[in-house]
Every structure is written in C-alpha cells, then in structure tokens.
C-alpha cells in the first residue's frame, strides 16, 4: 500500500479528484471495504471477549461495564496494560503479547484509513485522500493512500491474521493459568 503526500495549496479540494471516483473502481473496492468492516468488527468483539475474561472468567458483566463506552484504541490500551501486568507477575516477556498488541494497533490504523478515506476522491490509480497532516516543518499536506483491490485484500488478510493470533494468545494464557 503506497502513500504520497502533496503540499496543501489554498483550498481543501485542490489536488483531489473532484470528478468523482470511477464507477468500475468503486465496484471493485466497495465489497472489499465491506469485508474489512465485517472482519474488523469481529476482531473487536474478540478483543471485548478477551478483556472481559481478564476481569472474571465466568461472567462478563463487570468487564462489559468497564468497556461499554470505550473506543477501540482505549480497549487495546487497557488490554496492553493487563498483559504488561501479566508479564510483571510472571517475571518474563511473552512474545505473543507484544505481537498481538502491535497488530491490534495496526489493524485499527488500517481500518481507520479505509473507513475514513474520501472514496469519492479516488483516482483511477487507486490513490484516495485519507487525511490532512499539519507539521511545523512541512506545513499542511494532503495524504493519499493507494487503495488498489490488492492493497485492500492485504488489509483484510492482515485483520484476519490478527484475529487468528487470539488463538495463540489463548494458548499462552491457558499455559500461564495452569502453572
């Protein structure tokens, strides 16, 4: 997935595709975007379940009370803090913990790029406006990400693989609890 930044000139829509996205491009990408949303929501539910298990294994009511108004990144942060505490109690690093947290963060970032992209601005080559970047040295820039169908498939695959990492996590937790 390629990115490019274009220096902001004077108007918000300057440099974007104001003609609207090519229908053929949208027809190819729209189902993939839907699958990304579906897979990500499933991943978040798995995270919810893992968090609730950390509060109390038999009942999830306490965990649900805590996480009910949290956004995804706050849930990942809470999960990370729980796992850090587990590592402290064990006195050793658990590689799956760090990998899972990093991939949960990345999955959230990828999902946000896809969901918040301005799909009507997509060019035929897949470059789609995703956000404005404001920095002291470079000023305001427009960021474009090339969301080709292949790039969207890779995002979907990454989210699905992250979902699968919860199996490894559950094995690690089961092993820890059996000690």
Image (cartoon, rainbow, N blue to C red):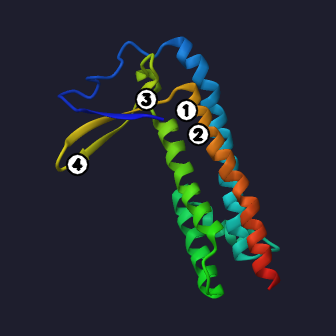
Q: Which mark is residue 135?
A: 4
89 with respect to 58 (left or right): left
Gap between marks 4 and 1 measured at Cα:
27 Å
Q: Is residue 31 visible in the rendered structure shown here?
A: yes
Query: Which callout, 3 or 1, points at the residue further toward the start of the chain?
Result: 3
Q: Secondary structure at mark 3?
A: loop
Of circles 4 and 2, the one toward us is: 2
Q: From the viewer's perspective, is the residue at label 3 or at label 4 nearer?
A: 4
Tag 1 or tag 4, which sits nearer the N-term? 4
For label 3, the residue is 118
The CA span between labels 3 and 1 is 16 Å
Q: Which mark is residue 155?
A: 2
User: What is the spatial separation of the Cα atoms under label 1 and label 2, in whole angstroms?
Assistant: 6 Å
Instruction: Identify the residue shown where x is 58% and y is 62%.
Output: 101
Q: Residue at x 42, y 27 (%)?
A: 128
Cβ atoms under marks 1 and 2 closer than 8 Å? yes
Residue 129 image-quadrant placement? top left
Query: Left or right: 1 with respect to 10?
Result: right
* Above-or-below relation of 175 to 27: below
In the image, what residue occupies the spot 47% across and 37% down? 116
Q: Secondary structure at mark 2?
A: helix
Comparing 56 with 26, the one in front is: 26
- Residue located beneath label 1 in the image: 151
Q: Would residue 153 be found to the left or right of residue 139 on screen? A: right
Label 3 Cα neighbours within 10 Å, binned few <14 / some 14-19 / many ≥20: some
């Amino acid at each position: 997935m390629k990115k490019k930044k274009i220096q902001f000139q004077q108007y918000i829509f300057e440099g974007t595709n104001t003609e609207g996205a090519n229908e053929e491009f949208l027809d190819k990408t729209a189902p993939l975007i839907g699958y990304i949303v579906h897979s990500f929501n499933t991943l978040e539910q798995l995270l919810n379940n893992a968090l609730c298990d950390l509060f109390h294994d038999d009942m999830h009511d306490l965990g649900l009370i805590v996480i009910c108004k949290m956004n995804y990144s706050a849930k990942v942060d809470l999960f990370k803090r729980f796992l850090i505490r587990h590592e402290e109690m064990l006195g050793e690093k658990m590689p799956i913990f760090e990998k899972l947290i990093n991939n949960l963060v990345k999955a959230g970032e990828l999902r946000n790029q896809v969901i918040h992209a301005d799909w009507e601005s997509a060019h035929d080559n897949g470059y789609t406006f995703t956000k404005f970047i404001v920095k002291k040295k470079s000023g305001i820039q427009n960021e474009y990400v090339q969301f080709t169908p292949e790039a969207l498939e890779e995002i979907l695959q990454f989210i699905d693989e992250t979902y699968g990492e919860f199996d490894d996590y559950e094995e690690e937790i089961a092993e820890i609890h059996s000690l």
